[in-house]
Amino acid sequence: MPNIFKNYDLISDGMKLNSFGQKSKKCRFCKREEKETTFNSKSHLIPELLGSNDYINEDECDICNSHFSRFEAHLAIYFRPHLSLLGVKGKNKSPKFQSRSNDDKNDSRLLMENINGMVNLHLYEGENDVIIDQENQTLQIHFKNPGYRPLWVYKALVKIGLGMLPDRLLFDHEQTFKWLLEDYGDCLFDPLIFTSSLVKKRFVCPFAELYEAKSERLDNSQIPQYILMLYFANQVIQVVLPFGQKFERSNDFSKKIVVDLFPSPILDGDLKGIKQINPVILSGAELVCTDHIMEFTFQSAEFKRQDDK
């Protein structure tokens, strides 16, 4: 049995609950009450940008919903190659991927969209974002992501975890709630996530699970207090959430922190694919541009130049 299941308890399951929080008209994030704010928006626990879903935060006010939407936009940019490639439908339709240009021109190097399960790639003359090997039936796509703020990506993920926290644990995370409501703010921990892409499986609807450590202390090390697992498209994301105040007061941070990895490759039937799990530190509030290179095999495809008749 993987250590994550030995060392953690599942305390909130998005597959079983569609509604989180209480209809008390007090925001769990900013603590404003109904006389100070409104609760008119339908606040999704998991952003619809990651796929249409019905997981609702009942105690998220409109002010916080608007504030968090900026973080969620950067989360969607970060994962857009996967969302566009698989045609994941959000609130309205599947997103298109349009790569950034490395010069001052307005034209794009690559435009990709999924229409009814058919992937359409539009390339501009003279660009090499797609390498096609018809003899070996392989396709390599170089995705040049638009700019995003890594810290905002992490904050969007932390917001999901805090939205799933049982009410009994909210008091211990006041500092994290305060940090989440800031645009920037110092990050006193490593904003660490682990990503993996499934090959054989995809999730029709996104969902999430929240795990709590049975004991944060091991022999000569410590493990994170909370782990968020997020599933969408063909992505499995493991998020190390910030420590609660009680944990910070009672533990020795000179000890190394060990993260038990969720064995996501087994969802594809791959028992040896642990190396396919990629650690990412989402630090920094400045805009950054990163590239993703994906390789595919195909059985049949149709390739046309723009000037083909």
Image (cartoon, grey):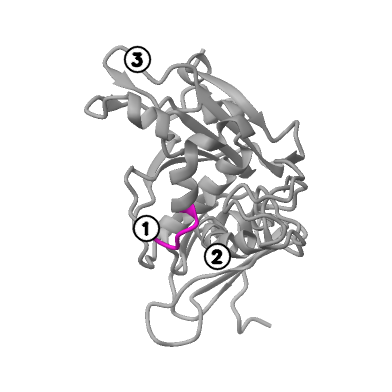
Badge 3 crowding class, 10 Å Cα cut-off, few under 14, some 14 to 19, many 20 or more, is few
Tell me the distance, in whole angstroms, between the alpha carbons under discs 1 and 2. 15 Å
**Where does the image place residue 227, in percent across and percent down from the top left?**
50, 32
Of helix, strand and loop, which one carries label 2? helix
Tell me the distance, in whole angstroms, between the alpha carbons under discs 2 and 3. 38 Å
Q: Is residue 183 magenta?
A: yes
**Where does the image place residue 76, in percent across and percent down from the top left?**
57, 59
Q: What residue is at 49 percent from the left and 86 percent from the top?
A: 106
Q: What residue is at 44 percent from the left and 55 percent from the top?
A: 293
Q: Which mark is residue 70?
A: 2
Residue under label 1, please give it: 185
**Where does the image place residue 8, in percent across and percent down from the top left?**
51, 20
Residue under label 3, please give it: 218
Q: Is residue 66 left or right of residue 124?
A: right
Report the span colored magenta.
Answer: 180-185
Q: Is residue 155 left or right of residue 83?
A: left
Q: What residue is at 37 percent from the left and 65 percent from the top?
A: 288
Tell me whether the residue at label 1 lies in contact with that at label 2, contact meaning CB atoms closer than 8 angstroms: no
- Up/down of 174 relative to 33, above or below: above
- Up/down of 243 relative to 9, above or below: below
Q: Main secondary structure of the magenta part?
A: loop
Q: Nearer the viewer, residue 307 or 28?
A: 28
Badge 1 crowding class, 10 Å Cα cut-off, few under 14, some 14 to 19, many 20 or more, is few
Q: Is the C terminus in the top left, top right, bottom left or bottom right quadrant?
A: bottom right
Q: Nearer the viewer, residue 288 or 18?
A: 18
Q: Nearer the viewer, mark 3 or mark 1?
A: 1
Lower position in the chain sequence, tag 3 or tag 1: 1
